[in-house]
Image: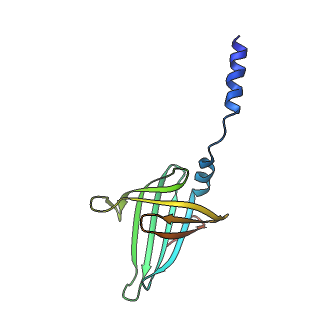
Amino acid sequence: MCSVLLQAALASGCNTAPDPGDEVRERLVGTWLRDYEENGTHVRRILVLEADGRFREESRSLGPSEAGVHHSHEGEWLYDGTNLKRRYTLMDGQPVSAPTMPFAALQIRFTGSHEFTGTDNVRHRELRYQRVPAGTEP
């Protein structure tokens, strides 16, 4: 009787389908670059997604009247099956406080083996990220 129950338990465990979100989460772990122009300002943004659910985001912008502005943010991330969600806990080394919106969500789709596009449905824009080597600077 015990062996029948054990076999049934093992068999049911083998029939469990893997969560497709797990594969996407694993693909997201790493270092990503978003390089773009906005209102005459060139911006390089590095997003590092750690396997433990933490993230770091560094950006450097250079515009016609700027010598180079640098920002550094940290927080927690997750993938919910559709969206890459980030909750900021530090912005430029300071704890996040109101009225700053400490969340970002992107509906993502991979457009190649080393890039994804995220749709920001709140600000109605599309953002493109490319995988880059660890240690890449903004």
Q: Is residue 136 visible?
A: no
Total number of numbered discs in the rendering: 0
The outermost residue toward the left is 98
Residue 119 locus on image (x, y percent) = 51, 65
Colouring method of the image: rainbow
In this orientation, which residue lies closer to the viewer: 82 or 116?
82
Residue at 35% over, 63% down:
91
Q: Quadrant of residue 128?
A: bottom right
Residue at 47% over, 57% down:
55
Residue 23 locus on image (x, y percent) = 63, 50
Q: Would you place residue 112 above or below residue 63 in this image?
A: above
Q: Is residue 20 visible?
A: yes
The outermost residue toward the bottom is 64
Residue at 36% over, 88% down:
65
In this orientation, which residue lies closer to the viewer: 117 or 72?
117
In this orientation, which residue lies closer to the viewer: 116 or 136?
116
Residue 10 locus on image (x, y percent) = 70, 26
Residue at 54% over, 54% down:
82
